[in-house]
Structures are given as C-alpha cells and as structure tokens.
Image (tube, coloured by chain):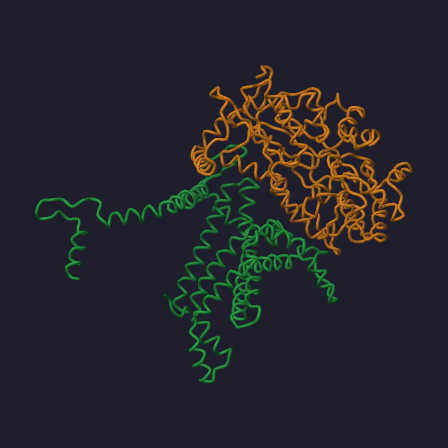
Amino acid sequence: MATLERARTKAADPRPRGDGSRRPFWTARRRDQLAGYLFIAPQLLGSVLFVLIPLVLVFWYSFHEWNVLAGSFHGVGADNYRALADDPKLPGVLRATAFFSVGLVVLNLSLALALAVLLNQKLRGSIVLRTLFFSPVVVSLVAWTIVWGFLLQKNGGINAGLDLIGVEGPNWLRGETSSMISVVVVQVFKNVGLNMVLFLAALQGVPRELYEAATVDGAGRWRQFLRITVPLISPTILLTSIITVVGSLQVFAQIAVLTQGGPGNSTTVLVYYLYQQAFEFHHFGYGATLSVLLFLIVLVLTVVQWQMRKKWVFHES
Amino acid sequence: MSSSTRHRTRPGRGTLVRGRPVALAAAGLLALTACGGSDGGSGSDGGPVTLRMTIWTGNEEHLKLLNSIAADYRKKNPDVKEIKFDTLPVESYTTALTTQIAGGKAPDLAWIFENSAPDFVASGALAEIEDDEDVLPAAKKLWQHEGKLYAYPFSTSPFGVFVNTDMLKEAGQPAPAELIEQGKWTWEEVAKVGGAVRAETGEAGMVIRDFDYKMWDNLATVWDGWGAEPWSEDGRTCAFDEPEMTEAMTFLHDAIFADEAMPAPGTTADFFAGEAAMTVTQISRASLLDDSFGWDFVPLPEGPAGSYDVIGQAGLGVLGNGDNVEEAVDFLAFMTNEKNSAALGRYFPQARASQLDADTLATSNPQLKPAQLEEVVIGGIENGKVKPTHTNQAELFDAVRAALDPLWKPDADVAKTLQDVCSAIQPQLEK
C-alpha cells in the first residue's frame, strides 16, 4: 500500500527528475483538471456572457443617458444617482416593494411550513394533496396570472364564491390595499408548493427518536415543533427564506398582468418601475440606476440573512 | 429601385450616433450573442436585401394582403429577396419595438401608434419619406415635423358606435338610428338607454372599448363632446381641471355609478360577444362581427358642444438607422400607392382624398352600408381629431392613469381628482 502511495505521489510530481529525463506534460492530474474545466466551460461562458457582462454594462449605463429613439448616448456622471435621491415616486415604490416582500415571505414560508407539517403525517391522500399543492409551480406564470386576473374581477369567480356564503367581495384589483394583497396571494399560491417540498424533505430528515424521547420527557406537540423540528430544519428555512426574499424583490409578470402598477401607484414595485423607466419611458440610464439599486438591496438582504444564520441556524452540513 | 423615392435623416443625427460607440458595441454584442447576427442582407453592399416590418396584427387576412403586396413589389424589385412582416403583441407593441431598437435589431419599417407618434417623429428616429398630395393634410399632421413627412398615415380609423339592435329591442329601448332621426342622439340619451338596458337585461349598456379604466385616452371619444382637452394646444398646460373636462368626467362618473349605463371598474363586457348593447370603437373592429345579432353602426353621440369626430391613427415609418433605408422607403411608397391603398382600406382606412367616397369605400368595406360609410367614415376621416398625443407620451400617460384612478370610485370627488391630475402632470408638461 505504501509503495502504491509513493508511486502516485511520484507520478503527480511535476518537477524534473534527477536522472535528467522530463515528465510527460499530460499527467493524470492535468487531464482531470482539463476535463473539469471543459465540463464547467459552457456554464462559465454562459455566466460571463449573460450574467457578468450585462451586470457590468448595467453599472456602466447607470452613468449615462441613453435615448434609444433619439439615438443619443452620453455620460452624465452621477446625475442618475442624484435623480434617484430626488425621485418623488421612489419612496412609494420602495414601500410597495417592502410591503410585497414582507407579505410574500411571511405568508409563503408559514403556509409552506404548515402544509409540509400537515402532509408529513401519514394521511390518506397525502400524495395527491402534495401533487395538488405543487402543481402551480409547473404552470406557466403568465397563464396562471391571467386566470387569476379573471377570478379577481368584481364579477369574477372569487366574488361569486363569496356571494354563495352571503359575503360581498371587494373589487380586488381596484382597491389600493386589496390589489397588493391580491398580487401577494396569487404569488403565494403559485410558489408555495416549491417551499413545501423543500420543507417536506427537511422534515423527513429529522430523526424519529428525538420526538420519541421528547414524548417520554412529557413535551407536547407544540414544544416538540419549536424545540426539535424548527432547529433541525433551520438550514432549509434559511435556504427558502433567501430564495423567497430574492424572488419577491424580482416580481414582475404578476404586476404587469394583474395591475400594471395601479390603482394609483400602489403596486408599482421596484422591478416594474425600472421596467417602466427603461422600456416604456425610454430612460435607459435611469432604469439601469434603479437596477443597481435593486442589486444592492438584494445583495444586502442576502448577506444579512447569511450572517444571521450563525445565530439561528442549528447546524450546517 | 424607383429613382423617385428618396430619404433624408434628421440633421444632427450623425453627431448623436457618433456619441454612443459603447452602447452600440454593447448592443451589437448582445444582438450577436442572442440572435446570431444580422437578420438580413445589407443594401449598402449592393447584395440582396431582406426587409423586415414590425406590425401589431397577426390576423391571417391582414397578413395575406400584406404578403401579396410584398410579393408584387419583389417581382419588380428582384434585389429585395424577402419582405418579412413581424407581428409583435399589441399590448406591448411600442415597448417591444423600442427594445429591438435598443438591442441593435431595429426593423426596417415599423407600424407606429398615434400615441407614440410625437416621440418617434420629433426624436429623429424615422427617415423622411416622400409626401403624397392625395393624402388629406389633417391625416398627415401628426407625422410631420418642420414641414417634412416622417411616416405615412397608414390607418386612419374613425370612432363610431356599434349597436346591438336586438338587445335594445329586448330592453324596449329605441334604436340609435331613430334617435338620430329625432335629433336626440346625445350622450345624455345614451346614459338613459344604457341604464335601461342594464336594468332590463342585466347586460352592459355602453362600453368604451379598450378603456378598461386604464387606457384613458380612449375617453376622448366622450369628452370631445364637451369640447374638453387634456392639455393646451401647445401641450404645456394641463386642462384636466377646466370646466368642460369636469363636466364631461362628471357625466361619465354618473353614467358608470349612478345610471349604471357603463360597466363598473373590474367588470368586463365584450360587445362583439353579445355582452353589451353599444360600444364606442373604430370601424376596423367591424371584422369582429358575425351574424349572431342584429347590429348598426352610427356616429358618436352629440355632447353639449355639439357633434364631433375622433380618429385613431397609425403611421408607417422607416427607421432611419437601418441598413436598408432607401429600399424600405421605396417599398413603403409602393405599399401605400393608390392601388394598394385601395386594397388596404378594407382593414386599414386610408385618408386619400381620391378614395373618400362611399362607392369606393363600399367595395373595401362590404359590411358597412353606404350611409354608414358616408356619415361615420368619410366625415370622421375628413374632420376627425386624433386622440390626445404628447411627447414623452408613455410617462405622461402613466402619470394621468395613476392620478385618475381615484375617480373610478362611487364616492369620488370629480373636481378634486382632476385638479390632482393637473398637479401630477403639470411638471412633465412644462419639461
């Protein structure tokens, strides 16, 4: 065994040998490295072309004024960033973005966890229910939103259902609060299945004997949930919260289809606003500046969540 | 190529174009990576040319007609190897078009809606085209800049009212034709009839098609009856808070929430599916009619300011920065010549003086009677005012839409809301 180990070490040693002969260039190690680089090359190329370059370009554009129709493109220094600070619409946009994100994250994660806990029980039909709750994830987002748009009309399906139980539903997409709630709920139902599946996988990894021991010690269901389940699935909670927070800050199609930012500007979230500025109002430079702002917000929130894991994530593999 | 055609881009464009090498390089890189390079040959190198025109319609009949005109053109111009009509979704048409321009994939020719006309024409994005004396001056106004024509007014479509005569009969209401005869075809009467239809049948009375409490510029088909304007003629002063507009909007508010003559926000009613008794829309929508109910097409009702006409318009322009500008200008001239205009008039009403008679229009609009053509179409094209337009239209449009939203509630304060609209848009108008 020791002989074999020495032979491997010798083969991997790129230094010239004492007898003056040179080792071949294509060693096994180099071949492995090349294969590794070739495997990641397509993804790397794609990331450079479609992620890194656009990111740098967006930053570059944020220091320019680019009027597509007029064909003008010139540097404006930090003017776009000054405009950002003076934009009277931006505080409302950030409030709407925060409202949407908080609502979505809280509702999505709590509902996903509740569904996962329920469907983790040995219930008849639980597989069917899991499929049912997961199925919206694979439905086209725009198609899903269009259907919900019909359901949420004043004379749509939701209010027809409420009417059956004697409740007069609001005009969901016309009220400033109800429209935002509607967009959040539509998005929660669309994606809750994904987080539910992740939580289910985590729940099934919690050792049964811990619950048995806790039961013997007299701990009730709620205490078991708080003291055993939550800590042991906390890495998954971290993962889902990062994914959901980032996703919530990038919501676009639902707003574009359901409300177009209205009524008023109540559902104009940051991504929709930057789309308007760049592609509808033709202020590409300012749109790029808003993209930089969004990038920084996502970055800060992700870093904060990542740092907070030290305090509340039970363990990491 | 016809030697009679020519194009000129706007003075100063060269300077602007030279000032954005990085953007062009970036756009070029993106276009190259995303789409594999240019979509057609270049006229500049003398090789065969491919022309691409963006349009909003995917209607098979429309495309068949456009392709047949393109085929005729190619027979006479073999150096143009292909003419493609690229359909973009109507709801995001202008955005998609400007995105293509930004990405270095501008089409050679583009359909341009009236609401973005000032931006396209004033910015210098379009190449100058040959003027045509046969086209009515009023129809060309929107597409001219400093006396030169930058897009052909391709579709000049008057607004009128389509009426479901069966539904009115069922509701025990007079047909608009009778009201016209009696001199009672007014918005006040429409509100009464519409409210009665709603009460009797449960269906909608009057629908301002495509308004949907967002596309507020379609309300010009109503407020013009009060002589109202959204802004002053020079576009620099808000007029939403003027008395005429306040009266017009008060009428609309009452018609929606008090009389229930119009569908309330959040409800939809499609006239062409038999869900409404009347709808204000353009004659080009006649193609949506079938034989499922009896119908009529009448002029817009009179308002307190009397009778009036409103037109929706689209222009056809050549993008000045394209590779094949000369060829595109030449094709545009061919596509909109007298013969082809007559054929296109079936779907896209043409504002040519020589074709504005009921007999000529009847051959291309078989669904409409000569009297309807005379009253609504000819009168509308000759006298109609285009829906409101302004430079920086998209931003202005969104600001008005947002500020008008509080109006669409039962207890809205109409005058205050309109004042708020002015507060919101006046800074933009002054830019």
- Is B15 left, or right, of A171 in this rendering? left
Quarter residue B98 falls in: top right
- Establish if B327 lies above or below B182: above
Up-down: is B370 above or below A254? above
Q: Colour of chain A?
A: green
Give the colour chain B carries in the figure.
Answer: orange
Extreme-top residue of the structure: B3
Q: Is residue A214 above or below residue A193?
A: below
Residue drawn at (47%, 77%) of the image: A224
Residue A233 place in picture, x, y as percent = 44, 69
Q: Quadrant of the N terminus of chain A?
A: bottom left
Tell me where residue B30 appears, x and y as whole percent.
45, 38
Q: Residue furthest left?
A: A19
**Viewer-nearest residue: B28 or B62:** B62
A187 vs B5: above or below: below
Q: Position of residue B337 (x, y in %)?
A: 67, 21
In the rendered structure, the answer to whether residue B173 lies left or right of residue B103 reads right
Q: Nearer the viewer, residue A34 or A98?
A: A34
Q: Look at the image and tell me in which quarter the C terminus of chain A lies.
A: bottom left
Along the horizontal axis of the image, is B249 left or right of B176? Answer: left
